[in-house]
Image: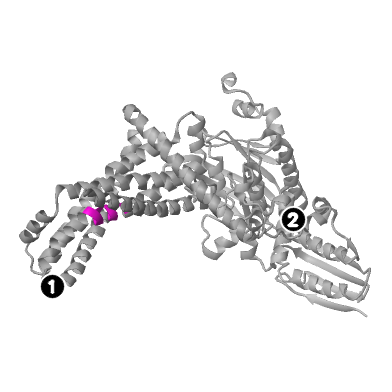
């Protein structure tokens, strides 16, 4: 384990688009090897926060440190080095449509490692096997279902065995069995290999079974309204918004 | 006898191959085993293993994993690669001292045979099959075109009867985009065509002292042929491709399906406004192109000492209103085929990002083919009827 305790440090982060501020003054950190889940209702800025964390968007204010390196100010080679230390799975999969699944996974290996074609293929097959897609390695992204595309995207995000994985709604649209398999893979990678996961998710069942820590965002508060173990929050939180979310209560009943 | 080959890498020594004898060997792994540190090392170890495996039978290989600081999926893939090679030659393989935390992940890949499929070879189609498929595609395309033409005619007729239900907002957007936005490029191209046409004609005619006939000739050519053709080709390049890309993206995003399942005809909703815009815009742009071309031709003939008034009088003698109308009618037909082909190719879009690009390309190519086809038919009709 690295000397640094935190995989990600978020300091005084303000997220938004132009003058439209979605979230302000966020402060939190993700520990190494932790499965960290970001929760919140639709439109509260979960995905935007995620895109700020992995440096796709520039925050309005504040800093994001990935393994101690500030991604918001890094440029050139320094930034590229930070970028290879994590993997990202986008909500829609974002697989390269002109390549089959195996080539999608090996693409980043070709660019960053010295492995031979056969070694990359074997490694890519292992990754596809982890997400249950081994029989589909020669399929094009357009030939498989949406849920399978997401799993392939996770395999691609893991291509370089990054220590941090950002997953944007990985289990949405998956059947319960596949979703449970994916959860067990995530747990395996986290507990045994020390991978850190930052996951945006709505799936309560999945959150209870994998999350070490959650933060809950709120559109009106423009910030974090709850933080901690999801089961503890479900059972003890006094905040009606948190209680409502974890217990799936309809909005008119809560009012 | 013992041969030790230290193998270095970015993070020094990761793997050491030790060969005790023909039947016994050992790989010692140490440090961080990951996708970067394995580059090169993987190949060297596997080469050493393959060379050793050739030396005997029922060999046993031990992998000492007790010095590993960290192991990721790439490291596990490496272990699997070594194990598979060992199994294939009928030898033994044992991993010693591997931290138990890596066991669950290693078991994920059990049995490892699943990871080694025979590479799939794409079926090679013979000449007969290829020809048959090409013919089938051609027939399918023709059928698609005819069906589309039928639907479009029916929906256009419906729109005339239900004029208020036409999507006039979309029509205006398409007309502005295809028409007003196209004015600069149409002006530029028709100006240059006017210049080129007159110069080319003048060079030839000068030898016969017939430079004064260049004006009427150029004007007639522009009004009947060049004006409509230039406009149609520019429309094909700009608007047909744009329609195909726009509707193609909607097809990829299932927006067209959403119209169908909502009980709305995508042709009436998406195609009719665009085709109507094509019908409106093509003749207007053609008229504009005619004027600019004739003006540039007039300017060019100044160089040959033909005054404006002579050019004008010559033009009036040669060009009838009928000629202009014939050109505009042709332009209208071009407008229909160009916008319709763009929409058709858009609706035929497959899946994925590349499909939209293919549709846009097909839209331009088929538009130009259709323009030439319509022009040919029109020329024949003009010849027979004198219109």
Residue in the foreground of this view, choosing between B240 and A151:
B240
Residue A133 as seen in the image, left or right of residue A142:
right
Q: Tell me if residue B185 comes above or below residue B177 in the rendering.
A: below
Residue B153 position within the rendered picture, expressed as x and y whole percent measured from the top left:
38, 36
Q: Which residue is the site of mark 2?
A: A126
Q: In the image, which is nearer the foreground, mark 1 or mark 2? A: 1
In the rendered image, which quarter contains the N terminus of chain B?
Answer: bottom right
- Name the element at disc 1: loop
The chain letter for the residue carrying disc 1 is: B
Q: Are marks 1 and 2 on the same chain?
A: no
The chain letter for the residue carrying disc 2 is: A
Q: Which residue is the site of mark 1?
A: B208
- Name the element at disc 2: helix
Main secondary structure found in the magenta portion: helix
Residue A57, numbered label = none
Residue B160 position within the rendered picture, expressed as x and y whole percent measured from the top left:
32, 30
Residue A211 as seen in the image, left or right of residue B64:
left
What residue sits 71% from the left and 33% below the top?
A231
Residue B181 as seen in the image, left or right of residue B244:
left
Dot 2 alpha-carbon crowd within 10 angstroms: few under 14, some 14 to 19, many 20 or more: many
Reply yes or no: does residue B242 show up in magenta. Answer: no
Magenta-tinted stretch = B224-232
Residue B198 position within the rendered picture, expressed as x and y whole percent measured from the top left:
18, 65
Residue B182 seen in the figure: yes
Q: Residue furthest front?
A: B384
Q: Tell me if residue B81 comes above or below residue A52 in the rendering.
A: below
């Amino acid at each position: 384990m690295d000397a640094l305790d935190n995989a990600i440090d978020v300091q005084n982060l303000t997220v938004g688009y132009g003058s439209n501020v979605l979230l302000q003054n966020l402060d939190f950190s993700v520990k190494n090897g932790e499965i960290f889940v970001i929760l919140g209702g639709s439109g509260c800025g979960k995905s935007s926060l995620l895109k700020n964390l992995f440096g796709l968007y520039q925050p309005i204010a504040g800093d994001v440190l990935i393994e101690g390196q500030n991604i918001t100010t890094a440029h050139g080679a320094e930034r590229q080095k930070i970028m290879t230390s994590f993997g990202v799975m986008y909500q829609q999969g974002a697989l390269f449509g002109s390549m089959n699944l195996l080539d999608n996974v090996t693409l980043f290996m070709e660019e960053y490692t010295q492995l031979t074609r056969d070694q990359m293929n074997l490694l890519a097959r292992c990754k596809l096997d982890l997400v249950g897609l081994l029989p589909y390695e020669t399929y094009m992204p357009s030939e498989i279902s949406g849920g399978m595309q997401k799993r392939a995207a996770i395999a691609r995000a893991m291509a370089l065995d990054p220590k941090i994985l950002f997953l944007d709604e990985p289990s949405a649209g998956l059947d319960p069995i596949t979703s449970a398999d994916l959860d067990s893979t995530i747990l395996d990678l986290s507990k045994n290999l020390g991978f850190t996961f930052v996951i945006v998710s709505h799936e309560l069942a999945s959150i209870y079974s994998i999350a070490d820590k959650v933060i809950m965002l709120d559109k009106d508060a423009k910030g974090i309204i709850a933080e901690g173990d999801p089961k503890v929050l479900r059972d003890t939180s006094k905040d009606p918004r948190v209680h409502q979310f974890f217990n799936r209560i309809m909005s008119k009943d809560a009012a | 006898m013992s041969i030790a080959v230290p193998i270095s890498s970015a993070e020094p020594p990761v793997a050491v191959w030790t060969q005790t004898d023909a039947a016994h060997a050992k790989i010692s792994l140490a440090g961080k085993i990951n996708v970067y540190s394995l580059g090169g090392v993987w190949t060297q170890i596997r080469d050493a293993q393959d060379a050793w495996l050739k030396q005997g039978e029922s060999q046993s290989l031990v992998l000492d994993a007790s010095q590993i600081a960290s192991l990721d999926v790439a490291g596990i893939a490496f272990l699997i690669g070594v194990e598979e090679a060992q199994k294939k030659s009928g030898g033994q393989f044992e991993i010693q001292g591997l931290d138990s935390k890596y066991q669950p992940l290693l078991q994920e890949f059990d049995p490892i045979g699943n990871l080694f499929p025979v590479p799939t070879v794409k079926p090679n189609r013979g000449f007969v099959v290829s020809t048959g498929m090409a013919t089938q595609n051609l027939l399918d395309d023709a059928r698609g075109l005819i069906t589309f033409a039928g639907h479009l005619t029916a929906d256009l007729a419906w729109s005339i009867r239900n004029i208020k239900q036409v999507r006039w907002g979309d029509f205006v957007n398409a007309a502005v985009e295809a028409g007003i936005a196209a004015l600069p490029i149409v002006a530029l191209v028709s100006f240059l065509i006017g210049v080129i046409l007159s110069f080319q004609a003048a060079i030839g005619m000068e030898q016969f002292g017939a430079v004064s006939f260049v004006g009427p000739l150029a004007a007639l050519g522009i009004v009947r042929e060049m004006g409509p053709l230039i406009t149609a080709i520019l429309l094909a390049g700009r608007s047909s491709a744009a329609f195909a890309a726009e509707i193609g993206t909607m097809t990829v995003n299932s927006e067209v399906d959403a119209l169908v399942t909502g009980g709305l005809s995508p042709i009436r909703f998406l195609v009719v406004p665009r085709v109507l815009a094509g019908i409106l815009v093509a003749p207007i742009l053609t008229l504009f192109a005619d004027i600019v071309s004739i003006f540039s031709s007039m300017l060019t003939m100044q160089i040959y000492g033909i005054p404006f008034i002579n050019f004008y009088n010559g033009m009036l003698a040669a060009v009838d209103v009928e000629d202009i109308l014939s050109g505009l009618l042709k332009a209208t037909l071009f407008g229909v085929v160009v916008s319709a082909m763009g929409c058709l190719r858009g609706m035929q879009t497959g899946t994925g990002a590349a499909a939209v690009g293919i549709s846009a390309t097909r839209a331009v190519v088929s538009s130009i083919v259709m323009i030439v086809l319509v022009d040919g038919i029109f020329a024949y009709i003009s010849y027979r009827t004198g219109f």
